[in-house]
Amino acid sequence: MTDHSYRLPGATGDWELVLGLEVHAQVMSESKLFSGAATAYGAPPNTQVSLVDAAMPGMLPVINAHCVEQAIRTGLGLNAKINTYSRFDRKNYFYPDLPQGYQISQFQYPIVGEGEIECERDDGSIFTVRIERLHLEQDAGKSIHDLDPNATYVDLNRSGVALMEIVSKPDIRSPADAAAYVKTLRSIVRYLGTCGGDMEKGQLRADVNVSVCKPGAYEKFRETGDFKHLGTRCEIKNVNSMRFIVQAIEYEARRQIDIIEDGGTINQETRLFDAGKGVTRSMRSKEEAHDYRYFPDPDLLPLEVPQSRIDEIRADLPELPAEKRKRFVEVLGLTEYDASVLASDKDRADYFETAAKGRDAKLTSNWVNNELFGRLNKEGLDITESPVSAEQLGELVALIESDVISGKIAKDVFEILWDKGGSPAKIVEDRGLKQVTDTGAIEAVIDQLIAENPDQAEQVKEKPKAMGWFVGQVMKAMQGKANPQAVNEILKKKLGV
Amino acid sequence: MSDLLSLSLADVTAKLKAREVSATELAETALQAAEASQPALNAFCAFDRDLTMTMAKASDAKLAKGEGGLLEGAPLAIKDLFAVKGVETTASSNILKGFKPRYESTVTEKMWAEGGVFLAKTAMDEFAMGSSNKTACTGHVVSPWRAEGSNKGLTPGGSSGGSAAAVSADLCFGATGTDTGGSIRQPAAFTGTVGAKGTYGRCSRWGAVAFASSLDHPGPIAKTVKDSAILMQAMAGHDPKESTSLPLDVPDFVAACGRSVKGLKIGVAKEYRVDGMPEEIDALWQQGIDWLKAAGCEIVDVTLPHTKYALPTYYIINPAEASSNLARYDGMRFGQRVEGADLTDTYEKTRGQGFGAEVQRRILMGTYVLSAGYYDAYYLKALKVRRRILEDFENAFEKVDAILTPSTPSAAFALDAQFTDPIQMYLNDVFTVTANIAGIPAMSVPAGLDASGLPLGLQVITKALDEETMFAVGAALEDSAGFTAKPNKWW
């Protein structure tokens, strides 16, 4: 097994990282958490704002049951305990993009309790992250500072949109693992259909808690549960890409190590990641620290969900990436690597499963993972934007499987599909690409070649590898349409290999 | 015509139905009387003559066809806490100056659906915080009542003081109020009117400016118990827009007023006999007991041992919720903004100048009790005591059908009475806050006059969802008391 431990060298020896993430995942829902306003992305400013979202006097929140079910679904996907009783609290603070002057959140009694997920590294290895909780809360609006040098504008479209805050335990030990954790979470919520997971659209945002410690300290913490073994943590707010997560952690860890090694102490604080400069900086000083004055929101009743409803939702859950990966390996016979590449993303998995339906799974997976993904990556396209549909690719695989075309010809057909589209069978038919399996025709070509190249034929007897030249010549003569297996067999026989 | 204004709601709607008077004539008369009263009483803070007359005309059209709802054609006054579409709604606060909602509160919408005619908005203690109506941004409301032989201005009580004054002075046929700690019942008691609130969640809070959400109860102020039942009938009902609204059908409150009280058990709690309570209040209470006994009720001693913690509990929960509810008044989206040097300065100036002293005091208290390190000691403890107070009532209602108490510890005080200590003002709520803490029905019924000829009220409290018994007992008290006193018209 590869060693995944991550250490940073310092003047006083090596340091380790302890990371915990708070991921805000926007609930996939037509309307907001407590109002009927729409949530569609990219609408003109302040066009998706209800009286409740604008906090007009006398307006009251009413819970959107769909969002509650989405949170439960997500909790189940995180293998977490679903709380039949939860409650909404008010988190009080002033900000122009927070019209109520408080955010409705779940502080003391979250809807989802402890859980655990298996995360996957790029090399396919697995690590476990424990989930502390998941709670529902309202998103704030957006302050726009760059429209006017003298004014800040506020767009309330996002105000009141439902978020799930997913809090991990401090189980993550390296920047790459932090990114892998977020990728896994994204994959799970996308599978569940509970969050779009698009970080560019802000559907998934991470707050990263970073602390550093000496080797051995973390193990003591895990044994005792006592945080005194760990360093003081800083929270980096709103990091909105995998790359930034890695950069922010790397910078922040180094900053903390330098402070400690210079004899300083770390202040527990909230920091911002400046992506332009690649640094984190303090967001507010201790004096400005918020006292959120949480208290139960008197406008809302406690949320009580019957166990029977939770069980129904559980029964309805789709297959999740970890299960899917396992099935791809165990039932379909894919390699661990191929299985995990395909299963990690719902769109990829869906594509693969559609293409592989009734076809050779391994062959299909090779085509999806190598030809298709290779080409998509090159063009910078997402699987959902692929010019070659899963149905087309499946048909192509079927043609290879039934020896209608060779793999080599299939690549040509793939290119045609990519550029022009169409039906693979028809392309093969129209362009006469059908593989020649007529042994008589192949034999005739071979006989002629041997007759024309007696020296080469002799050579093959000494050096069987030289047969490759004949294979190439046959293919060339037959415009690549000869069945390679048949060519090989006949050649062996005729050349006496 | 002005005699018409002294009719009860029940009587005037009967006359309207019989077409003895038209809704437009009535509205015109009421508007003139209300406008004429303004320099003296200052009960109203916003009129909308066009709206009033349009609604009255619509009522006439319905009445002409023999149609019409419970309130058809009756001019009604609306506490300034309720949003009335297109009419300035300020909760009597400068911070909401100029705010005209584009929506209608559920309670008023239901009233209009029953044919009620909007007369005017009534002034109140700013954001409903107070018991004197002295903190309205439009200036204090003056009670139509005066002590015998005196022309000293008296408070109509508060916070629904404008509504109480308007009903008491026969300027309308009923009004809405909100009761967070007694804000319907105390002004009703001070003005010789009937004030009632139902079970928490019976009347929707949607579209009413929030003060202390878990304590706020909309309800009517009326001339008679039956009128209050008619009004609550119209105001009540499940509102899907409010999560704490009761998802229940509304019982027939009006019919309940005619129910016999014979055989009902009436509780009397010794904890309501507070130190320093004037003798005449005590005497009135005894009188009420005797009336109900004579009506066939059985009087039972009950104990409500946590009553003494009610005021402190109330004055923790109430400001805590208010401090959060009032955070939205930041001058950004509606109401009045005072520009400052930067954002924080703008917030500070807007809120510093927009909110009056009492509102600021409550925000400070509420912020304090919710602060880190104080939450457990104050807010959490208050919630626990709240539970105990509710249990006190639940235990008592195992034994009795209703509880009878005085409404207030005194009659109306002078407008220039100096409360050096805000606690003194808070003590006005001593008999009324418990029903808000417990969320149970309670009403004040005028029952007599004090030595100087000022009205005093008795309070009837019943268990949750049992407004019907409250109205039945209230009506029995009203019958026995035969209270007919009216303020001498001096305005």
Image (cartoon, coloured by chain):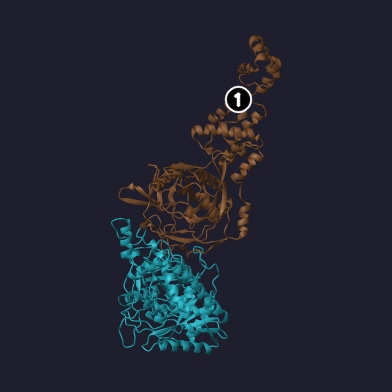
Chain colours: A brown, B cyan
Name the residue at the front extreme. Answer: A12
Location of the N terminus of chain B (image quadrant): bottom left
Q: Residues within 10 Å of mark 1 (few under 14, many from 20)?
A: many
Q: Nearer the viewer, residue B423 or A227?
A: A227
Chain for mark 1?
Answer: A
Residue A181: x %, y % from top left? 52, 46
Residue B194: x %, y % from top left? 44, 79
Residue A282 located left or right of residue B389: left
From where the camera sits, is residue A29 visible? no
Q: Nearer the viewer, residue A65 or A273?
A: A273
Residue B266 located left or right of residue B419: right
Q: Indicate the quadrant where residue A362 lies.
A: top right
Q: Nearer the viewer, residue A286 or A205?
A: A286
The amino acid sitting under disc 1 is: Ile
Residue denoted by label 1: A409
From where the camera sits, is residue A317 visible? yes
Residue A38: x %, y % from top left? 48, 52
Q: Nearer the viewer, residue B285 or B386?
A: B386
Location of the C terminus of chain B (image quadrant): bottom left
- Please give the name of the residue rendered at 55% of the width and 70% of the height, measured from the top-left corner: B249
Residue B14: x %, y % from top left? 47, 78
Assign a secondary structure to mark 1: helix
Compared with A22, B236 (above or below) is below
Name the residue at the left extreme. Answer: B341
Compared with A214, B405 (above or below) is below
Q: Indicate the quadrant where residue A313 lies.
A: bottom right
